[in-house]
């Protein structure tokens, strides 16, 4: 079985070798720029690891793996435009460098390339692979829409929030794991278990992101804490705090978040103090642990050599091991 | 064989019956709005007519036909955003009604839906159908990029212009005709001939649009003439005029187009006068006739009952019969 690092190298080599034309440069240069910006290549690596549970050579699954990575980068490109974000992975975003119209059109072309790569997968389950990809991509759009809808709401429930992050981020990881199993013609029950495993890992990962933004060690986490608080973003912590708060805590919380005159450090400290009063750190860690445990249980259901599933678990754990 | 009107009704009924969820409304309402705005449904009707040359029942080709229509509407939605257009088919554009972010995300979801519909086509040539669709969609992006590139250039050649409109508009018509043949498992030579036929019809149609914008009868054409001149758009007339102009004509032409103080009617009349000096009306009509004749020759190559191909020809002719 290949290690995640070996698979990452294979994915990066295959991405670099994609036969993209040079012209029109205005269309393709931003795509090359975007795909070369690095990252963990989580989705293709996960797909290839799932495939690798059942088959030795990963080449037959590579085009589908690239499809998911290109798709993921397409969503980031268009999300960055919608969020008006300036920087992605330490470099200017495509719309900042080339303008909004380039971001729209090159992003569209990436979505087309993603489908072409998934469709090029030489496997007997071809139809089901495509259907899985198309339905997942639609769910990701729904998640993004819910995220935008929630920006204007202060009454988002925990269940709604979890469903939003499930759609926006987890289903694509789940799709990657299931797609690897499908291409390998693994047993149906394994494909289901791998889907559920990766979905829970995704939820744990996203909640951990929410947690670390407030309680993380900036030196380890790699960015300053409190960013979510400053932009009033709905997170598991904020949504949960609103649900648990009494009337007084709720009005203090809303007043703090609405206050644009407060210095950043004070605002972060005051909101964090309310989170602490309400036990949100523990509540969030418990939710993470619960998803983590569920992920583990689903992984144990699958019918592959124990050493192989342990490698997959170790990979998932390495993603989550950022000093929660 | 079904008439174009019958096929149009079938397409509209199938579009209205698409199983789209109601929520999140912010994602799906703009899609329903966009797909219900009418139009000639040229691409799906052409696909079904091509299929109908070989097979009686058109149902097996319907999902692919819908895929092309949804794809076409996706391109219009994103193009309208990029062009900052206010109106489409007599109604506010999606970005004008719901905002740019909605236009981006709902447009992305339409592209995903389009692929899902094409992928759902139950036919033995499934892989080739998808490959044709993906490569065509990429060409359409290239055409749109070239169109944007050309806005900043005054040295676009006739060949470059024709290649741009071929990519931006003709290849999707050609794809529709070939896809109908592929799904019907028509002879390979017929699929090629139908592709070439529809490509030439598309070129003739686009050049006719350029012609009518200057020389059309507003009462018949349905809009005021001269719009392309006023916005300095590259058209077959402008590109051809620049190529044919001597130094004096060229500088008069460029000065007129750059003059933002000139009343609209005067500008249109003066530019049209230069087109007339250079014989552009005849040149454009000759180019249209040549593509039209090529289209006819390609259609005559195909191995289907003559009555059927005549129906297809009559449909193409009806599209072009707008009093050139």
Image (tube, coloured by chain):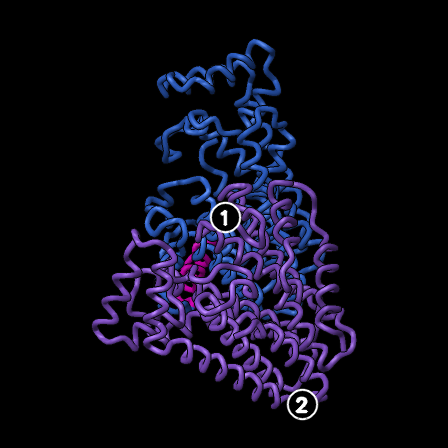
Chain colours: A purple, B blue
- x, y (%) of residue B283? 58, 24
A148 on left or right of A299: left
> What residue appears at the point 25 percent right and 66 percent down from the top-left corner?
A252
- x, y (%) of residue B220? 38, 34
A150 on left or right of B188: left
- x, y (%) of residue B121? 57, 67
On the question of residue A139 being in view, the answer is no
Q: Is residue A295 above or below residue A263?
A: below
Name of the residue lying farthest toward the top: B248
Q: Is residue B175 above or below residue B258?
A: below
Q: Main secondary structure of the magenta part?
A: helix
Chain letter for mark 1: A
Quarter holding residue A227: bottom left
Q: Which residues are magenta?
A: B1-18
Task: Give the mark nearest the N terminus, 1 or 2.
Answer: 1
What residue would you read off at disc 2?
A303
- x, y (%) of residue B154? 57, 24
What residue would you read off at disc 1?
A86
Q: Secondary structure at mark 2?
A: loop
Q: Find residue B304 and name its label.
A: none
Q: Is residue A313 magenta?
A: no
């Amino acid at each position: 079985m290949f290690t995640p690092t070996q698979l990452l190298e294979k994915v990066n080599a295959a991405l670099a070798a994609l036969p993209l034309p040079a012209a029109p440069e205005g269309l393709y240069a931003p795509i090359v720029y975007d795909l070369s910006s690095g990252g963990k290549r989580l989705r293709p690596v996960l797909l290839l690891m799932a495939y690798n549970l059942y088959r030795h050579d990963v080449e037959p699954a590579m085009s589908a793996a690239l499809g998911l990575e290109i798709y993921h980068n397409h969503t980031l490109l268009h999300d960055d435009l919608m969020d008006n974000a300036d920087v992605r992975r330490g470099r200017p975003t495509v719309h900042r460098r080339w303008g909004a119209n380039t971001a729209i059109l090159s992003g569209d072309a990436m979505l087309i390339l993603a489908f072409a790569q998934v469709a090029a997968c030489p496997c007997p389950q071809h139809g089901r692979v495509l259907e899985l990809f198309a339905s997942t991509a639609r769910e990701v759009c729904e998640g993004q829409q819910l995220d935008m809808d929630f920006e204007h709401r202060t009454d988002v429930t925990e269940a709604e929030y979890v469903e939003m992050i499930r759609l926006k981020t987890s289903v694509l990881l789940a799709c990657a794991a299931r797609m690897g199993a499908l291409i390998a013609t693994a047993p149906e029950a394994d494909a289901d278990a791998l889907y559920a495993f990766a979905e829970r890992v995704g939820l744990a990962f996203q909640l951990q992101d929410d947690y670390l933004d407030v309680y993380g060690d900036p030196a380890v986490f790699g960015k300053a804490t409190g960013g979510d608080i400053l932009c009033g973003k709905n997170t598991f912590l904020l949504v949960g705090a609103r649900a648990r708060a009494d009337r007084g805590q709720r009005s203090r919380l809303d007043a703090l978040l609405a206050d644009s005159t407060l210095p950043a450090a004070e605002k972060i400290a005051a909101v964090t103090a309310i989170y602490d009063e309400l036990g949100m750190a523990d509540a969030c860690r418990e939710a993470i642990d619960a998803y983590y445990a569920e992920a583990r249980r689903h992984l144990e259901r699958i019918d592959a050599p124990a050493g192989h599933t342990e490698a997959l678990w170790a990979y998932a754990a390495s993603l989550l091991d950022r000093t929660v």
